[in-house]
Amino acid sequence: MKKIILLVITIYLLIAPITYHPDTKLVLYYPTLGGEKVWNIYKYLNENIDYVPKFHYPPMNYLLTKTELPLVKYIGGEKIVNWFSVGSNVAFLDKNIFLYNLASKFPILLMLLIAGFVIYKIGIKSGLSENRSRLAALIWYLNPITIYSGVMMGQNDILAIMPFIIGLYFYYGYPILAFLLFGLGGSIKSFPLIWAIALAGVYPTKSIFKKIYFASIPIIFYILTLLPFIKYDYFVKDVLNSGLAMRMFEIRYFLPVVPVLLIVITLIAMKNNMGKNYFGIATLLVTINLAVLSFSNFNPQWFIWIMPFLSMLLVKEGGYLNYFLICVSLFAITFMFDDIFLYWGIVTPINANLINLPSIYQILSSNNISVIFRIMLQLITFYWLFKCVKYKN
Protein backbone atom coordinates (compact mmCIF):
# COMPACT_ATOMS: atom_id res chain seq x y z
CA MET A 1 0.00 0.00 0.00
CA LYS A 2 2.88 2.39 0.67
CA LYS A 3 4.15 1.91 -2.88
CA ILE A 4 0.65 2.30 -4.32
CA ILE A 5 0.04 5.51 -2.34
CA LEU A 6 3.41 6.95 -3.42
CA LEU A 7 2.59 6.13 -7.03
CA VAL A 8 -0.86 7.70 -6.72
CA ILE A 9 0.54 10.83 -5.03
CA THR A 10 2.99 11.23 -7.91
CA ILE A 11 0.24 10.88 -10.53
CA TYR A 12 -2.11 13.22 -8.68
CA LEU A 13 0.61 15.86 -8.29
CA LEU A 14 1.28 15.70 -12.03
CA ILE A 15 -2.38 15.99 -13.06
CA ALA A 16 -3.89 18.37 -10.49
CA PRO A 17 -1.82 21.51 -11.26
CA ILE A 18 -2.39 21.43 -15.03
CA THR A 19 -6.18 20.92 -14.91
CA TYR A 20 -8.75 23.53 -13.99
CA HIS A 21 -12.48 23.78 -13.37
CA PRO A 22 -14.18 26.96 -12.11
CA ASP A 23 -16.24 25.16 -9.45
CA THR A 24 -13.14 24.36 -7.38
CA LYS A 25 -12.23 27.97 -6.75
CA LEU A 26 -15.88 29.09 -6.52
CA VAL A 27 -16.54 26.74 -3.59
CA LEU A 28 -13.45 28.08 -1.82
CA TYR A 29 -14.46 31.67 -2.58
CA TYR A 30 -17.52 31.46 -0.31
CA PRO A 31 -15.61 31.05 2.99
CA THR A 32 -13.51 34.14 2.15
CA LEU A 33 -16.58 36.39 1.93
CA GLY A 34 -17.13 38.68 4.91
CA GLY A 35 -14.05 37.50 6.78
CA GLU A 36 -13.72 34.92 9.54
CA LYS A 37 -16.84 36.02 11.45
CA VAL A 38 -19.30 34.94 8.76
CA TRP A 39 -20.77 31.51 9.48
CA ASN A 40 -24.24 31.96 8.03
CA ILE A 41 -23.17 32.18 4.39
CA TYR A 42 -26.79 31.97 3.21
CA LYS A 43 -27.78 35.12 5.09
CA TYR A 44 -24.62 36.94 4.06
CA LEU A 45 -25.14 36.21 0.36
CA ASN A 46 -28.80 37.21 0.45
CA GLU A 47 -28.15 40.48 2.28
CA ASN A 48 -24.84 41.58 0.79
CA ILE A 49 -23.91 39.94 -2.52
CA ASP A 50 -25.79 39.39 -5.76
CA TYR A 51 -22.96 38.79 -8.23
CA VAL A 52 -22.11 35.19 -7.26
CA PRO A 53 -24.38 32.10 -7.32
CA LYS A 54 -26.12 31.20 -4.08
CA PHE A 55 -24.51 28.53 -1.88
CA HIS A 56 -26.61 25.39 -2.41
CA TYR A 57 -24.79 22.96 -0.10
CA PRO A 58 -25.82 22.16 3.52
CA PRO A 59 -24.23 24.12 6.43
CA MET A 60 -21.79 21.32 7.31
CA ASN A 61 -20.32 21.59 3.81
CA TYR A 62 -19.61 25.30 4.34
CA LEU A 63 -18.11 24.61 7.78
CA LEU A 64 -15.77 21.99 6.35
CA THR A 65 -14.79 24.19 3.40
CA LYS A 66 -14.04 27.06 5.76
CA THR A 67 -11.85 24.68 7.78
CA GLU A 68 -9.93 23.77 4.59
CA LEU A 69 -9.12 27.38 3.76
CA PRO A 70 -6.05 27.83 6.03
CA LEU A 71 -4.37 24.79 4.42
CA VAL A 72 -5.20 26.05 0.92
CA LYS A 73 -3.77 29.50 1.78
CA TYR A 74 -0.66 27.93 3.34
CA ILE A 75 0.13 26.08 0.10
CA GLY A 76 -1.03 28.71 -2.38
CA GLY A 77 -0.08 31.85 -0.48
CA GLU A 78 -2.29 34.72 0.66
CA LYS A 79 -2.81 35.99 -2.91
CA ILE A 80 -4.79 32.89 -3.76
CA VAL A 81 -7.76 34.55 -2.02
CA ASN A 82 -7.74 37.24 -4.71
CA TRP A 83 -7.62 34.55 -7.39
CA PHE A 84 -10.82 32.99 -6.04
CA SER A 85 -12.72 36.15 -7.03
CA VAL A 86 -11.29 36.33 -10.57
CA GLY A 87 -13.69 35.53 -13.42
CA SER A 88 -13.83 31.87 -14.41
CA ASN A 89 -12.99 32.55 -18.06
CA VAL A 90 -9.70 34.32 -17.24
CA ALA A 91 -8.57 32.73 -13.95
CA PHE A 92 -6.45 30.14 -15.79
CA LEU A 93 -4.33 32.98 -17.27
CA ASP A 94 -2.78 33.79 -13.87
CA LYS A 95 0.98 33.22 -13.78
CA ASN A 96 0.54 31.14 -10.59
CA ILE A 97 -2.21 28.97 -12.04
CA PHE A 98 -0.36 25.66 -11.48
CA LEU A 99 0.27 26.48 -7.82
CA TYR A 100 -3.29 27.72 -7.30
CA ASN A 101 -4.79 24.64 -8.91
CA LEU A 102 -2.74 22.37 -6.67
CA ALA A 103 -3.47 24.38 -3.52
CA SER A 104 -7.23 24.54 -4.12
CA LYS A 105 -7.41 20.79 -4.80
CA PHE A 106 -4.99 19.69 -2.07
CA PRO A 107 -7.63 18.88 0.63
CA ILE A 108 -9.61 16.94 -1.99
CA LEU A 109 -6.53 14.92 -2.96
CA LEU A 110 -5.83 14.09 0.69
CA MET A 111 -9.36 12.78 1.16
CA LEU A 112 -9.19 10.72 -2.01
CA LEU A 113 -6.06 9.08 -0.60
CA ILE A 114 -7.65 8.42 2.80
CA ALA A 115 -10.80 6.97 1.21
CA GLY A 116 -8.68 4.58 -0.85
CA PHE A 117 -6.87 3.35 2.25
CA VAL A 118 -10.20 2.73 4.00
CA ILE A 119 -11.41 0.79 0.94
CA TYR A 120 -8.28 -1.35 1.27
CA LYS A 121 -9.06 -1.97 4.97
CA ILE A 122 -12.69 -2.85 4.16
CA GLY A 123 -11.42 -5.28 1.52
CA ILE A 124 -9.28 -7.03 4.15
CA LYS A 125 -12.19 -7.05 6.58
CA SER A 126 -14.53 -8.53 3.96
CA GLY A 127 -12.23 -11.49 3.33
CA LEU A 128 -10.35 -10.34 0.23
CA SER A 129 -6.66 -11.16 0.09
CA GLU A 130 -4.04 -8.44 0.61
CA ASN A 131 -3.39 -8.29 -3.13
CA ARG A 132 -7.06 -8.02 -4.06
CA SER A 133 -7.66 -5.41 -1.37
CA ARG A 134 -4.78 -3.36 -2.69
CA LEU A 135 -6.17 -3.75 -6.21
CA ALA A 136 -9.56 -2.43 -5.02
CA ALA A 137 -7.82 0.64 -3.61
CA LEU A 138 -5.82 1.08 -6.82
CA ILE A 139 -9.01 0.89 -8.92
CA TRP A 140 -10.53 3.60 -6.72
CA TYR A 141 -7.45 5.80 -7.02
CA LEU A 142 -6.77 5.56 -10.74
CA ASN A 143 -10.05 4.83 -12.52
CA PRO A 144 -11.11 7.47 -15.09
CA ILE A 145 -14.09 8.66 -13.01
CA THR A 146 -12.07 9.39 -9.86
CA ILE A 147 -9.31 11.03 -11.89
CA TYR A 148 -11.79 13.16 -13.81
CA SER A 149 -14.09 14.17 -10.95
CA GLY A 150 -11.64 14.36 -8.05
CA VAL A 151 -8.24 15.17 -9.51
CA MET A 152 -8.99 17.09 -12.72
CA MET A 153 -12.20 18.87 -11.75
CA GLY A 154 -11.39 19.04 -8.04
CA GLN A 155 -15.04 18.49 -7.10
CA ASN A 156 -15.78 18.16 -3.40
CA ASP A 157 -18.08 15.12 -3.40
CA ILE A 158 -15.31 13.27 -1.59
CA LEU A 159 -16.04 15.43 1.49
CA ALA A 160 -19.27 13.44 1.93
CA ILE A 161 -17.99 10.13 0.58
CA MET A 162 -15.04 9.85 2.97
CA PRO A 163 -16.98 9.88 6.30
CA PHE A 164 -19.49 7.48 4.78
CA ILE A 165 -16.72 5.06 3.75
CA ILE A 166 -15.20 5.26 7.24
CA GLY A 167 -18.64 4.57 8.69
CA LEU A 168 -18.98 1.56 6.40
CA TYR A 169 -15.81 0.12 7.95
CA PHE A 170 -17.55 0.18 11.37
CA TYR A 171 -20.94 -0.98 10.03
CA TYR A 172 -20.93 -4.45 11.58
CA GLY A 173 -18.90 -3.97 14.76
CA TYR A 174 -20.02 -0.48 15.81
CA PRO A 175 -23.29 0.31 14.01
CA ILE A 176 -24.16 3.42 16.05
CA LEU A 177 -20.80 4.96 15.20
CA ALA A 178 -21.29 3.91 11.58
CA PHE A 179 -24.68 5.60 11.29
CA LEU A 180 -23.38 8.73 13.00
CA LEU A 181 -20.67 8.90 10.33
CA PHE A 182 -23.32 8.28 7.67
CA GLY A 183 -25.17 11.26 9.13
CA LEU A 184 -22.02 13.36 8.94
CA GLY A 185 -21.60 12.45 5.27
CA GLY A 186 -25.26 13.25 4.61
CA SER A 187 -24.91 16.58 6.38
CA ILE A 188 -22.13 17.59 3.97
CA LYS A 189 -23.99 16.50 0.84
CA SER A 190 -27.42 14.99 1.35
CA PHE A 191 -27.02 12.04 -1.03
CA PRO A 192 -25.42 9.65 1.55
CA LEU A 193 -28.66 9.84 3.54
CA ILE A 194 -30.22 7.65 0.85
CA TRP A 195 -27.42 5.12 1.31
CA ALA A 196 -27.81 5.27 5.10
CA ILE A 197 -31.55 4.56 5.04
CA ALA A 198 -31.01 1.61 2.68
CA LEU A 199 -28.23 0.23 4.91
CA ALA A 200 -30.47 0.55 7.96
CA GLY A 201 -33.09 -1.48 6.10
CA VAL A 202 -30.69 -4.31 5.24
CA TYR A 203 -28.79 -4.33 8.54
CA PRO A 204 -28.50 -8.00 9.61
CA THR A 205 -31.02 -8.02 12.45
CA LYS A 206 -34.59 -9.31 12.69
CA SER A 207 -35.60 -6.38 14.87
CA ILE A 208 -37.56 -3.83 12.83
CA PHE A 209 -37.21 -1.38 15.72
CA LYS A 210 -33.43 -1.58 15.54
CA LYS A 211 -33.55 -0.90 11.81
CA ILE A 212 -35.76 2.15 12.40
CA TYR A 213 -33.44 3.28 15.19
CA PHE A 214 -30.38 3.05 12.92
CA ALA A 215 -32.19 4.90 10.12
CA SER A 216 -33.17 7.68 12.53
CA ILE A 217 -29.58 8.38 13.61
CA PRO A 218 -28.32 9.98 10.35
CA ILE A 219 -31.67 11.71 9.76
CA ILE A 220 -31.63 13.30 13.23
CA PHE A 221 -27.96 14.22 12.78
CA TYR A 222 -28.82 15.93 9.50
CA ILE A 223 -31.82 17.78 10.96
CA LEU A 224 -29.77 19.06 13.91
CA THR A 225 -27.24 20.63 11.53
CA LEU A 226 -30.10 22.41 9.72
CA LEU A 227 -31.96 23.71 12.79
CA PRO A 228 -30.07 27.03 13.15
CA PHE A 229 -30.89 27.88 9.51
CA ILE A 230 -34.25 26.28 8.76
CA LYS A 231 -36.21 29.36 9.90
CA TYR A 232 -34.81 31.42 7.02
CA ASP A 233 -36.85 31.38 3.80
CA TYR A 234 -33.75 31.93 1.68
CA PHE A 235 -32.11 28.84 3.21
CA VAL A 236 -35.10 26.67 2.31
CA LYS A 237 -35.07 28.10 -1.20
CA ASP A 238 -31.30 27.96 -1.80
CA VAL A 239 -30.58 24.59 -0.20
CA LEU A 240 -33.61 22.40 0.50
CA ASN A 241 -35.47 23.26 -2.71
CA SER A 242 -32.49 22.99 -5.04
CA GLY A 243 -30.18 20.39 -6.53
CA LEU A 244 -30.61 16.63 -6.39
CA ALA A 245 -33.50 16.69 -3.91
CA MET A 246 -35.78 18.27 -6.50
CA ARG A 247 -34.35 16.40 -9.49
CA MET A 248 -35.13 13.04 -7.87
CA PHE A 249 -38.84 13.87 -7.73
CA GLU A 250 -39.19 14.89 -11.34
CA ILE A 251 -42.07 13.06 -13.01
CA ARG A 252 -40.90 10.64 -15.71
CA TYR A 253 -43.08 8.03 -17.40
CA PHE A 254 -46.07 9.39 -15.41
CA LEU A 255 -44.52 8.79 -11.97
CA PRO A 256 -41.55 9.87 -9.82
CA VAL A 257 -39.32 7.06 -11.09
CA VAL A 258 -36.33 7.55 -8.78
CA PRO A 259 -38.16 7.32 -5.40
CA VAL A 260 -40.13 4.30 -6.66
CA LEU A 261 -36.93 2.56 -7.80
CA LEU A 262 -35.18 3.32 -4.50
CA ILE A 263 -38.02 1.74 -2.53
CA VAL A 264 -38.12 -1.31 -4.81
CA ILE A 265 -34.33 -1.79 -4.68
CA THR A 266 -34.24 -1.51 -0.88
CA LEU A 267 -37.14 -3.96 -0.41
CA ILE A 268 -35.45 -6.48 -2.74
CA ALA A 269 -32.19 -6.06 -0.82
CA MET A 270 -33.98 -6.65 2.50
CA LYS A 271 -35.68 -9.76 1.15
CA ASN A 272 -32.35 -11.19 -0.09
CA ASN A 273 -30.41 -10.27 3.08
CA MET A 274 -27.89 -8.19 1.13
CA GLY A 275 -26.66 -6.57 4.33
CA LYS A 276 -24.92 -9.73 5.53
CA ASN A 277 -21.61 -8.89 3.88
CA TYR A 278 -19.80 -5.99 2.24
CA PHE A 279 -20.27 -7.31 -1.29
CA GLY A 280 -24.05 -7.39 -0.90
CA ILE A 281 -23.89 -3.84 0.42
CA ALA A 282 -21.67 -2.77 -2.48
CA THR A 283 -24.09 -4.30 -5.00
CA LEU A 284 -26.99 -2.50 -3.33
CA LEU A 285 -25.24 0.89 -3.29
CA VAL A 286 -24.06 0.68 -6.91
CA THR A 287 -27.66 -0.12 -7.94
CA ILE A 288 -29.04 2.79 -5.91
CA ASN A 289 -26.52 5.22 -7.38
CA LEU A 290 -27.20 4.11 -10.94
CA ALA A 291 -30.96 4.42 -10.38
CA VAL A 292 -30.60 8.02 -9.20
CA LEU A 293 -28.10 9.06 -11.85
CA SER A 294 -29.68 7.41 -14.88
CA PHE A 295 -33.20 8.71 -14.18
CA SER A 296 -32.36 12.27 -13.07
CA ASN A 297 -30.41 15.17 -14.50
CA PHE A 298 -27.02 14.54 -12.96
CA ASN A 299 -23.86 16.59 -12.70
CA PRO A 300 -20.90 14.75 -14.31
CA GLN A 301 -18.85 14.58 -11.11
CA TRP A 302 -21.59 12.66 -9.27
CA PHE A 303 -20.51 9.39 -10.88
CA ILE A 304 -17.67 9.24 -8.36
CA TRP A 305 -20.35 8.09 -5.88
CA ILE A 306 -20.35 4.69 -7.59
CA MET A 307 -16.64 4.03 -7.46
CA PRO A 308 -15.93 3.19 -3.77
CA PHE A 309 -18.36 0.28 -4.01
CA LEU A 310 -17.77 -0.73 -7.62
CA SER A 311 -14.01 -0.95 -7.01
CA MET A 312 -14.60 -3.77 -4.52
CA LEU A 313 -17.02 -5.58 -6.80
CA LEU A 314 -14.69 -5.38 -9.81
CA VAL A 315 -12.02 -7.17 -7.77
CA LYS A 316 -14.44 -9.75 -6.39
CA GLU A 317 -16.63 -10.46 -9.43
CA GLY A 318 -15.06 -8.88 -12.50
CA GLY A 319 -17.60 -7.18 -14.75
CA TYR A 320 -15.16 -4.81 -16.43
CA LEU A 321 -17.30 -4.63 -19.58
CA ASN A 322 -20.18 -3.32 -17.48
CA TYR A 323 -17.87 -0.73 -15.94
CA PHE A 324 -16.57 0.23 -19.39
CA LEU A 325 -20.13 0.86 -20.62
CA ILE A 326 -20.83 3.01 -17.54
CA CYS A 327 -17.73 5.11 -18.30
CA VAL A 328 -18.61 5.42 -21.99
CA SER A 329 -22.15 6.52 -21.14
CA LEU A 330 -20.97 9.00 -18.54
CA PHE A 331 -18.40 10.73 -20.73
CA ALA A 332 -20.65 10.68 -23.81
CA ILE A 333 -23.40 12.46 -21.84
CA THR A 334 -20.86 14.80 -20.20
CA PHE A 335 -19.54 15.92 -23.57
CA MET A 336 -23.07 16.91 -24.56
CA PHE A 337 -23.15 19.56 -21.81
CA ASP A 338 -22.78 23.10 -23.10
CA ASP A 339 -19.83 23.71 -20.77
CA ILE A 340 -16.37 23.82 -22.32
CA PHE A 341 -14.71 23.38 -18.91
CA LEU A 342 -16.01 19.81 -18.79
CA TYR A 343 -13.68 18.74 -21.61
CA TRP A 344 -10.94 20.68 -23.44
CA GLY A 345 -11.46 23.73 -21.25
CA ILE A 346 -10.24 21.64 -18.33
CA VAL A 347 -6.66 21.85 -19.65
CA THR A 348 -6.63 25.60 -20.39
CA PRO A 349 -3.72 26.05 -17.94
CA ILE A 350 -1.60 24.25 -20.55
CA ASN A 351 -3.05 26.02 -23.58
CA ALA A 352 -5.23 29.07 -22.94
CA ASN A 353 -6.37 29.16 -26.59
CA LEU A 354 -8.60 26.14 -25.94
CA ILE A 355 -11.12 28.50 -24.37
CA ASN A 356 -11.86 29.84 -27.85
CA LEU A 357 -13.01 26.47 -29.18
CA PRO A 358 -16.77 25.85 -29.37
CA SER A 359 -18.36 23.31 -27.07
CA ILE A 360 -19.18 19.86 -28.42
CA TYR A 361 -22.83 20.69 -27.80
CA GLN A 362 -22.53 23.64 -30.19
CA ILE A 363 -20.68 21.58 -32.80
CA LEU A 364 -23.23 18.74 -32.91
CA SER A 365 -26.31 20.92 -32.33
CA SER A 366 -28.16 17.80 -31.24
CA ASN A 367 -29.19 16.17 -28.00
CA ASN A 368 -29.89 12.76 -29.58
CA ILE A 369 -26.51 11.32 -28.58
CA SER A 370 -27.12 12.22 -24.95
CA VAL A 371 -30.53 10.51 -25.05
CA ILE A 372 -29.03 7.33 -26.52
CA PHE A 373 -26.40 7.03 -23.80
CA ARG A 374 -28.86 7.95 -21.05
CA ILE A 375 -31.02 5.03 -22.21
CA MET A 376 -27.90 2.85 -22.08
CA LEU A 377 -27.38 3.93 -18.46
CA GLN A 378 -30.98 3.09 -17.65
CA LEU A 379 -30.56 -0.38 -19.17
CA ILE A 380 -27.40 -0.85 -17.08
CA THR A 381 -29.43 0.18 -14.03
CA PHE A 382 -32.00 -2.53 -14.70
CA TYR A 383 -29.16 -5.04 -15.16
CA TRP A 384 -27.98 -4.17 -11.63
CA LEU A 385 -31.55 -4.37 -10.36
CA PHE A 386 -31.70 -7.88 -11.81
CA LYS A 387 -28.46 -8.68 -9.94
CA CYS A 388 -30.16 -7.61 -6.71
CA VAL A 389 -33.18 -9.81 -7.49
CA LYS A 390 -30.92 -12.82 -8.11
CA TYR A 391 -28.49 -12.06 -5.29
CA LYS A 392 -27.50 -14.97 -3.05
CA ASN A 393 -25.15 -14.83 -0.07
Image (cartoon, rainbow, N blue to C red):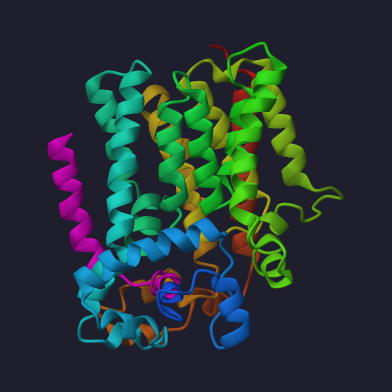
Q: Is residue 293 left or right of residue 158?
A: right
Our reading of the magenta stretch's main secondary structure is helix
Quarter occupied by residue 90? bottom left
Quarter occupied by residue 364? bottom right
In this picture, which residue range is highlighted in magenta?
1-28
Q: Is residue 27 magenta?
A: yes
Tell me if residue 313 comes above or below residue 67 in the rendering. above
Residue 297 appears in the figure: yes
- Name which residue lies at 34% across and 15% down: 127
Q: Is residue 98 left or right of residue 325?
A: left
The extreme right residue here reads 254
Q: Is residue 379 magenta?
A: no
Instruction: Give the percent coordinates (x, y) of residue 49.
Output: 56, 86
Tell me if residue 127 comes above or below residue 230 in the rendering. above
Instruction: Give the percent coordinates (x, y) of residue 295.
Output: 68, 50
- Name which residue lies at 69% across and 26% down: 212
- Name which residue lies at 42% across and 37% down: 165
Instruction: Give the percent coordinates (x, y) of residue 370.
Output: 60, 61
Residue 376 appears in the figure: no
Tell me if residue 61 comes above or below residue 222 in the rendering. below
Instruction: Give the percent coordinates (x, y) of residue 336.
Output: 55, 68
